[in-house]
Image: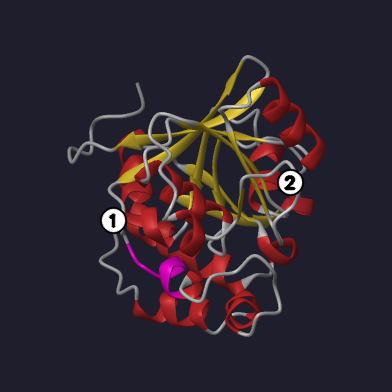
Amino acid sequence: MDARFLGIPELAEAPSVAVVVDVMRAFTVAAWAFAQGAERIVLAESPDEALALKARHPEWVALKDGPPAPGFDAVNSPGLLRSFDLGGRTVVQKTTAGTVGALAVKEASLVLCASFVVAEATARLLRSRDRDGVTFVVTGEDGRADEDLACAQYIALRAAGAGTDAADFLRRAGASRAAHELAEGVRQGVHPDDVALCLELDRFPFAMVATPEDSLMVLRPYAVPSSTDAGVR
């Protein structure tokens, strides 16, 4: 598999297949939202769009980066979100990097959103599609975030069928700037368990596929078959 690793500013055109990686914390949070019962996640362009969607659909759950804010129901923290009952609900998510990256490649034929907690399912889905070229969008720090790059490189190796030990990749992520800032309380809207939750390899058995729906970019869980010859339907 021919894998490219690009930051958001380096995306000159929409790739055919894109894997958008945000480990700390957007797509760890998204996976937790699905685990807590969410039906779908709408990826918002801006806080204003998230609030406008919430105003039109009061039953939806709006979440964002940073501290709690009026109009938002939750913050972008897996440790805090795991206490929410999201059964059957729509979540609106706006983050600094992850949602921006996904929206930047919305024209791709296949958009996956990923982190360590869904790494193996994401790799299996890529194998099932049998595509030669995959662009991994490293969302943090304009493509330099080591937690996102480590996760992207790990998924790429697993998608290529390599029997790869995840320990070094997880170690890199745990030593990253983002992990340090979360652990030290530099970032707001943080739970003490966030870093550990972001480093839980393959906690969830599904991949996450983003597709356009009624002018919105919508993320849904996808249960990847164990057979490598099945794809997205």
Q: Earlier in the sequence, mark 2 or mark 1?
A: 2
Where residue 91 appears, x then y in whole percent?
Answer: 55, 36
Q: Label 2 vs label 1: CA separation?
A: 26 Å
Q: Residues within 10 Å of mark 2 (few under 14, many from 20)?
A: some
Q: Quadrant of the C terminus?
A: top left
Is label 2 or label 1 in front?
Answer: 2
Where residue 215 appears, x then y in whole percent?
Answer: 68, 18
Residue highlighted by disc 1:
161
Asked if the stretch drawn in magenta spans residue 45, the answer is no
Residue highlighted by disc 2:
11
Q: Which residue is more in the foreground, 96 or 9?
A: 96
Residue drawn where x is 67% and y is 63% of the image = 140
Q: Which residues are magenta?
A: 196-201
Check disc 2 and give the amino acid type: Leu
56 horizontally vs 167: left or right = right
Q: Which quadrant of the figure has residue 60?
A: top right
Assign a secondary structure to mark 2: loop
Where residue 208 appears, x then y in whole percent?
Answer: 43, 40
On the question of residue 160 being in view, the answer is: no
